[in-house]
Amino acid sequence: MSAISDVLPADQPPILNMKGGNKPTSAVGRRQERLAWIMLFPSLLVVAVVALYPLFETFRLSLTNTRLASAREPRYVGLENYTDLLTDPLWWSSFQHTVQFTVISVLIETVLGMIIALVINSNFKGRGLVRAAILVPWAIPTVVSATMWQWMYHDVFGVVNDMAVNRLHILPDKVAWIANPSTALWSIIAVDVWKTTPFMALLLLAGLQVIPGDVYEASTVDGANRWQQFWQITLPLVAPALLVALIFRTLDAFRVFDVIFVMKGYATETMSVAVMARQTLIDKARLGEGSAIAAAIFVCISVLVVIYTRLIKIEEA
Amino acid sequence: MAQNAVPSTEALDHLVVPKRKTDVVGIISRVFFWILIVALMFYTLFPFYWAIVSSLKPNNEIFATPATYWPRNLDLSHYQFVLSNGKFLQALRNSIIVSVGTTLLALLFGATGAYALGRLKFRGRTAALYLILAMTMFPAVAILGSLFQMVRGDWFLHTPNLYNTKTALVITYLTFALPFTVWVLTNFFKAMPGELEEAALVDGATNFRAFWEILLPLAMPGLVTTGLLAFIGAWNEYLYALTFTTDYRAKTVQVAIAQFSGNTEYELPFANKMAASVIVTVPLIALVLIFQRKILAGLTSGAVKG
Amino acid sequence: MSETKKTLVNAMNGKASRRSVLKAAAAVGVAAPFAAGMLQGGIQSAAAGEDGLAALDLSGLNLSKDYDGQEISVILGADGPAVAWEEALVAKFTEATGIKVNVVRGPESATERLAQYQQLLGAQATDVDAMMIDVIWPGILAPHALDLTAAMDANGQYFERIVANNTVDGTLVGIPWYTDAGLLYWRSDLVEKYGLGQPETWADLEAAAKTIMEGERAENPDFQGFVWQGAAYEGLTCDALEWQVSNGGGHIIEPDGTVSINNPSAIDAFNRAKSWVGTISPEGVTTYKEEDARGVWQDGNAAFMRNWPYAWSLAQADDSVIKGKVGVGLLPKGDGPDAQNAATLGGWQMMASKYSEHPEAAIEFCRFLTSEPVQRAHAIDWSRLPTIEALYDDAAVLEAQPFFGELKPVFLGGAVPRPSTVSADLYNDVSTAYFTAVNEIITGQADAAERVAALETELKDIMAEL
């Protein structure tokens, strides 16, 4: 036990929080720097090959009125696509739905993921089973699970209604879960939470493993209760893993497409920004306008990433 | 090194598992704990159970009201349809190759990159991290067009036409698998004990040897976790596979399932799709079961006794 | 493939007799219960036989042998029970012409299929030589298509309306392969039980649906009056076009390019549909697609349904609980002076790519697939609606599909094409604007008159881009 605490200093700096300069001074430092770039090379090469060109193309196209497979001559239109987008009420309503969806689902997923991670991490009979079961939703193909949920939610023959009305008698009448405006968003969020909480749980679990046990022993001696231990020890120590998990989940949630598209089609009352991008890019084949939407999504996500890294830094300080 | 040592989770247990107390509070908290477990299991497993049940129902029973929780007439024909479909099995093989390829490349590139980002000091470190993250910040549908041109070797460079090949899928899947792997592993490497590596460096080993021979084996649990998530991500990918393949030389199961149709384009062969989904989900569950000890072994497992 | 294996494969797809399967199974040592299981599964997935294909006579087609040895790739339907049948059909083409055909399966979703085509054609890819295209795509894909006029003329007389829909600036983009039209289905047993007839007008349908629903709910609380497709997708464009045309409300955009949507008859039609939601139709109908509606109907939970012809053979299949209790016919019309029966035109065409390295072979294949003998076989074996007029009087077709006879007038007069040719490559913009507006109206998010006025502006803007 003691060995763990020896090698894991409590002031381990979290990721992205390099205090002091990164500037190497010594010869060893220069050698390290060279090695760093050599080791980063494959990843950066992949970025250069499969990411830079598409990203560059997206920004370039967003300044034109290019259409896919069209006989029309594309034309440079400056920032017109962006000004059009920012004055389009559909963008703003989609943006609002996306933010709602992202905040609510990531919040629930984090709390639920943390509970699951703590549960899996603890020792009780049958935890192996729980551990494997928890990951099942993540493993079911997304293409299919959204369709399956849609039919489970069906207002006439869906199993959710059957269970709630006929078996458990929780509800007096069948509910049109997806059509009813007051339940639509929550129904969609329930599917997303079901689907992606395992991802969150697995990453948080990895973070929990780092925490040395004797920290808890010490605090127990100090008389801290479980609740206090969680807030004072577990959460701060799991913060770096939480940050990474939050960033990637938020990135994904903000680009939510499948669940909403399968259940609600292109209905404006639940449209997300990615659904709008898809409609513009694929259905309407408007690469120019669609790329502008994609670029706007990119900007939104960048802002979110910056906010996250700042927030976690503040927590640290 | 005792790498397979059981991790010291006991210390955490008291955080969640209520102590076996005889007082009222203890009993209540134990009851609450098990209600929580049962509710969680129901939420996660019922839809999968429903997929299995649906795949065993004759087509007309799928719409039955009231819903049947076990098929009135057990019907295995959907599994026969899927398994007798040689194309589907071919697609299954493609999926395995593509997902394994993506995972291995992402882990190889990701681990080396993450070591640099997590343990070496150099200028441009933060910029590199964000650059890699930026790969995954666009909606996939937006970069589809340019990726398509690149895959066909039809951009400003003259590259080989990789359209309809598994290689094209592996390369494009790195756009989402790599950033994730790099970020998670960077975290892992950062949190690792420094002494071992330093000892190795003092002994005259190079940084790279320290990485390869000491840190990488220690990071195995992290590699397994990220590898599994990358594998599932690649396994479930649909949009790229649909756009960059035409036939079963490269088509993956996700595309194959999406292409199941009924007698007409309107009829949704729901039970066939469910049967196929159950079939493709089982290998993943098996994978999780095989690797779950590794996942749980966690970062610190036995490492420090070195 | 060996004969026995082939028979077994056919059995899986429901296309061999019980005896031939059991014989074949015995020959390869497959246990009888397993073979019987396959047979059962096959029959459940497809009620089709091979009669049409067996009787296929290509002698009248004069298929050219000039392209012997060439190899083409063709994108056909998704991966369904008809695959083995299609492959057998294609083999006959290869046998007759020497052209080797590599059949590629396309996505089931039409949107994804169009996106795939646009990616390939936009890149001027030679990977694909011919493909099946939806009835609304000729205007979008015209720049990439070979003119098929000569090939079609060699085949005979197709329905004028469908041909006109496929013609863009004098070029025939696709030869009509099979067609589709919106139909009204009803429960003949219930209509009779309550002393009602086939509804002539929407008001009739509303009254009948209400009567039946109120009567049946006593025993079955899930029972619905009328189900249709109300989700925000292309299917709603089809349904809503029927409502407005049948009420004398015009065709959204007229063939001369005039945006005619903003008229009282169209607005009335949308308001009428809105009044169904939550009354004779379930609240969830605004998220229904074809299969959601059929799911309610097929288990005996609805009196009326608007759907495509595919629902007929499924409702009449042996395992269907409503078998023998199904009526099918024209959708009702409105009450106004210009009211008429209307059925939105669907269906698929064969198009040849301009970028093909073997254009003649590709055109020859399109001609073959859409020819009268193949359409006859397709109609008999898979109940596909022919695009050639004469086949609706064909004895063999009518014997296999008795209700086809009633549909001939639909395609001669009542079938309404969506405004896809007039809006050319902007059709999806038009349709998206349209179904978005209608969905907002029927879900009560917008007032019909106001929303239609806004839609008119949107459509005019789109048409101004042409």
Image (cartoon, coloured by chain):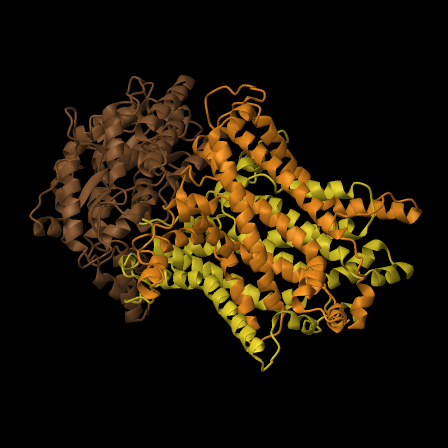
Chain colours: A orange, B yellow, C brown
Residue C308 sits in quarter: top left
Task: Tell whether A52 sits left or right of B241.
Answer: right
Q: Position of residue C445 (x, y in %)?
A: 36, 36
Say if residue C126 shows up in the picture. no
| Closer to us: C431 or C99 | C431
| Closer to us: A281 or C123 | A281
Q: Position of residue B160 (x, y in %)?
A: 60, 37
Counting the numbered discs, the total is: 0
Say if residue B277 shows up in the picture. yes
| Closer to us: C70 or A150 | A150
| Closer to us: B114 or A128 | A128
Residue A169, compared with residue C449, is above or below; it is below
Residue C300 sits in quarter: bottom left
Q: Position of residue C294 (x, y in %)?
A: 26, 49
Quadrant in which the N terminus of chain B is drawn: bottom right
Task: Tell whether C341 sits left or right of A214.
Answer: left
Q: Among all residues in the image, which is located at the extreme front?
A: B24
Q: Position of residue C149 (x, y in %)?
A: 29, 24
Residue C443 sits in quarter: top left
Quadrant in which the C terminus of chain B is drawn: bottom right
> Which residue corresponds to the image point at 34% horizontal and 52% vertical from the top-left?
A175
Residue C89, compared with residue C365, is above or below; it is below
